Structure formats: C-alpha cells, structure tokens
Image (spheres, helix red, strand yellow):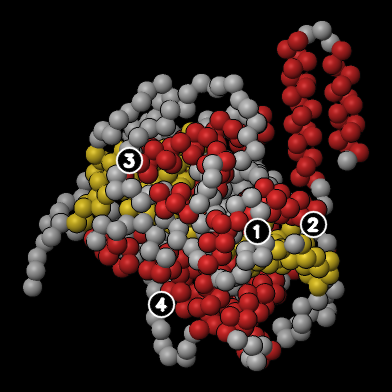
Amino acid sequence: MATLSPSSFTKNFNSSIDFPITSFQTFAIFGPKLKTEQTHFRLSTSFKTGSPLELKAMKEPPGLTQKLDKNRLDRLAESENGCDLFEDLKHRFLRFKKHKFEENLGHFQNLAEGQAPKFMIIACADSRVCPSVILGFQPGEAFMVRNVANLVPPFESGPSETNAALEFAVNSLKVENILVIGHSRCGGIRALMSMQDEVDSSFIRSWVIVGKNARLNTKSAASHLGFDQQCRHCEKESVDHSLLNLLTYPWIEQKVAKGELSVHGGYYDFVDCTFEKWTLDYKGSNFGKNSRLPVKNRFYWC
Amino acid sequence: MGSLEEAVEGLKKFLSDKDDVAVAQIEKLITGLKKTDLNECDPVKRILEGFQHFKINKFDKYPELYKKLAEGQWPKFLVFACSDSRVCPSHILDFQPGEAFMVRNIANMVPAFDKLKYSGVGAAIEYAVSVLEVQNILVIGHSRCGGIKRLMTHPEDNSTPFDFIDEWVKIGLPAKVKVQAEFGDLPLEDQCKHCEKESVKLSLCNLETYPYVQMGLANKKLRLMGGYYDFVHGKFELLEFEPHFHHLFST
C-alpha cells in the first residue's frame, strides 16, 4: 500500500536566481478515495522578474504583430517538449509584466491594496469570448464569472459557484453593474437545445438544464426556424432568463429597485463581429416569471 | 467629475515647488487620479469603446484568424482562475481568442468529482476534456485572494455567514487545515498566502477525481499545471503536477 507523506511547497522564486528543473516534492492527497496514490510536484522553470527596463508603450501583444494565422495557434503547446510550453507561458507573463505591470506601476500598486470594479460580468468559458479581450476590460475593472453557456441559476437552486460569486460581487464589492454576455455558436446552448428526454448522467446536461425555460420559450417561439437559428434564438433568450434569475436573489432585487445596481444583457456575435447590449427596465411590481423581460437602452454595434 | 477636477487643481498648486522628487510624485498622483476616473464613466460608453477598440485593432486586422475561430475552437488549455478583477489570464498570460477555455470562480477552486453538486464546474471540465480535448489544465491562484481569506477567517471570526460564499469556499477546507497545522504560528496574511498556494494544489488533486481527467492523464494526453500570480510583487510561479499511480492489484 502506498504511503502518504505530507510535504509543503517550499521553493521560492527569487528574482536574482534562476532555478533549473530541480526537486521533486511528494504531496499528500486529500480524501479517502485517493489513499492509494501519491503525486509528485516537479518544479519547472522559474520566472526571472529582472530589473525594470526602458519601456515603450505597447498597443498589442507582440505575437499579434506578426502575420498571424492558425499555425501560431497550432504551435502553442503542440510541441512534444513540455519545456517549450513553460517557456512560452513564462515569456507571456514577462511581456505582461514589462508592458503593462511596470508601465503602470502606481495603478497596479493601488490595485494590490484592493479592487473596486464597477462591473460584474457573467460570460461563457468559450475560448473566443473573453470579455477582457472583446470589451477591453483592464485589470481592476470587471469581476468575472465564466461558466458553460454564461448561465445564472435562480436563488432557489441552492449554492453554486455562480451565485457565490454574485454574492461577493454585489454584497462585498458592491458592483454597480451586472452584465450577462451570451454569444454566437455556443456549444452549451447547443447542448441544451439538443437534449433529449432520456436520462443522461453527464455534467453538461445537469448544468445546462438551468436554461430549460429559455429552451421552452425558444421551442414555442422559433420552432419554424432551422436548428442553427433556434440555437441563436436560445442564446439570446437564455441571457434574458439569466437576467430574470438574477432578480430572484433578494439582495440583487433590492439594489436594482433602489437604483444602486443595473442589470444588463449582452450578445457577442463573433461571426459578424457585432455586439448587442440591453438594460433591464425594472419597475417593480410588473415583474413575474412569465412576463416578457422589459428592457431599455438597447444598442446594436457593428 | 467635479471632485476630480478640484483634486487635480489642488495638487497642481504644489507643482511650483522646486523639489524635483515632490514634483515627480505629484505628477504621478495626478496621472493616477485621472486613470481612476476612467472607471467613473457611463457603463454603456465604456463597453462600446472597449468593443470598438477590439473590432478595429484585432477582429478587422486578423480576418483569417477570426474566420477560423468562428468555425470552431481548439483551445490547448482549460484554465481555472479567480473571478478577481485583477487576475484575468488574458492579461497576465496574454491568452488570445481561441487559446484557453476559461472558468472563473471565487478562489479558482475545483471541487472533487460529485455527480450531485457543482455541476457547473463538472460541465466545464467534461466539455473541455471530452469534447474540446484540451491538452493542458492550468489552475491559477493569486495573492490577496478574498475567497481564501474568507476560508481562513470564517467561522472563527464569528462573522455573519454568507448565503453561498461560505458553502463554496469550504471546498478549500483541507488546504486550510494543512496550512493551520504547518504555519499556524504565522500572521494571518502569511497563512493566507500559504493557503492560496495550497488550495491550487488541492484543486489539482481534485481534478484527478474526474474520470475523463484520469483517462487523459493515463493516456498521457493531458497535463496538469498550477500557477500562482503575485500582483503585489509582480511575480508568477508555475509548477507541473505529475500524478503517480501505484498499481496495487489486479483481479
């Protein structure tokens, strides 16, 4: 029987010392299920923080100033040599440190003391839709939750990762805006629309079922459309349902009613590069689960 | 806006001082104030400007790339990072569109496999590993994490429980226990730092409890990594997690 031996992560990275791949650390597994296993941590390359250099403002990451094509995407991490991957991540961080962190040191020092973002964003985990990229949110601006299909479960569904983040953002950070962003060709929404009635034990199904009302509405409103168009309809419908679900949280509804918090929906179409945005028009007593979402300030940017 | 202008005007009065060091400090303060004020602008305007910048400087500039991405995604990474506004991996590790399927939650936690709970995390792992076939999973912790601090201080501080946060950060309880046992004599801030790192390791262990992750590791198609971003000192640590399974018996 393998034994468990506790250890601790003790290697520190010092800016003046470059550690090669060195020691193995044995690490105890938590939980009875994993008693038979031991794991090892291998320390990989250190990151030289170096001394500040003469900095030039950088408008884009250097990788994108070359003629970029899909080959660059393929090159990243396709290498058989794991060290290439670590080296790549290291250089990415050092670029960030040089061109953003050190260039705006005062700002980052302020941020280190605390964050006061004005936005909470709920976006899909899809690799193509990071709000920091498509909407240019900078460090400190947006508290962000990313999950499959940018879903917000209702209050009565009990504790989840999404509502823990909502609670923190609204009650501790006191954000002024919540923005739920859907997007085109969402795999999660497609899974929701494709679900059959038979029992399916996958996590994906257990999660996307949060959007079941959006699927029902879509099936009734858009059944004459092709499947792809139905999915597109559901992508937007699901954002509206998430906005309604936000209001099932008492501390959210209270703040929205007082005008301290605004709730917005957004939709990013990466096929045409367009962005729609709309704001919940809260007028209190007219809200019900079955009513259409009243919105205002609808914008469409292309 | 009024209060910003007053503050800037007030500071400018000191610029006539002949002390170069003081002048430099004051100019820095003025720049900082003006930058902070960007956050005060209309949220709609803020989103529009951000989107326009992206469209002009990225989407329209690299049509081939974005056309390919519209057809599908083939990210090499599944990344778990904290929801904290200061630690987006697209900034600190410069992930470009298409590179990283990204989950963000409080304290970048991965709970152990449990069919009944936390299906959100399970769905992301299942989708990334089984459908997208990512090759790397990277869990990134960070300094001064509010979620870890809550884990380390509650319920001992007798504060009012939260509806959902406390239940969520409990995932990190084994990390808290370990840190208190080893570093219980250190100040809270140091214990929190240790827990931020220990929690990353715990999340990596928890990842191993997912069947599709186990299969990926066994077939050597998947690599697990832990990262730690220290935004106080501008440092990043990266480590690779190498599970080692002992074969005990066959039947």
Discs 2 and 1 share one subunit: no
Tell me the number on the disc at residue A121.
Answer: 1
Residue pointed to by mark 3:
A83
Question: Which dot, 3 or 1, sits closer to the camera?
Answer: 3
Seen from the viewer's position, the closer of residues A19 and A143 is A19
Q: Residues within 10 Å of mark 3 (few under 14, many from 20)?
A: some
Residue at left offset 59%, top offset 67%: A150
Give the distance between the C-alpha atoms of the residues marked 3 and 2, in whole angstroms. Answer: 43 Å
Residue pointed to by mark 2:
B44
Seen from the viewer's position, the closer of residues A287 and B229 is B229
Residue pointed to by mark 4:
A202
Q: Residues within 10 Å of mark 4 (few under 14, many from 20)?
A: some
Image position, residue A296 (x, y; %): 84, 70
* Sequence-wise first label, 1 or 4: 1
* Tag 3 and tag 1, C-beta contact below 8 Å: no
Q: Amino acid at mark 4?
A: Ser
SS assignment at label 3: helix
Q: Amino acid at mark 3?
A: Cys
Q: Is residue B228 left or right of residue A220?
A: left
Give the distance between the C-alpha atoms of the residues marked 4 and 3, in whole angstroms. Answer: 35 Å
Q: Is residue A40 left or right of residue A269?
A: left
Q: Amino acid at mark 2?
A: Val
Image position, residue B112 (x, y; %): 37, 63
Which image quadrant: the N terminus of chain A? Answer: bottom left
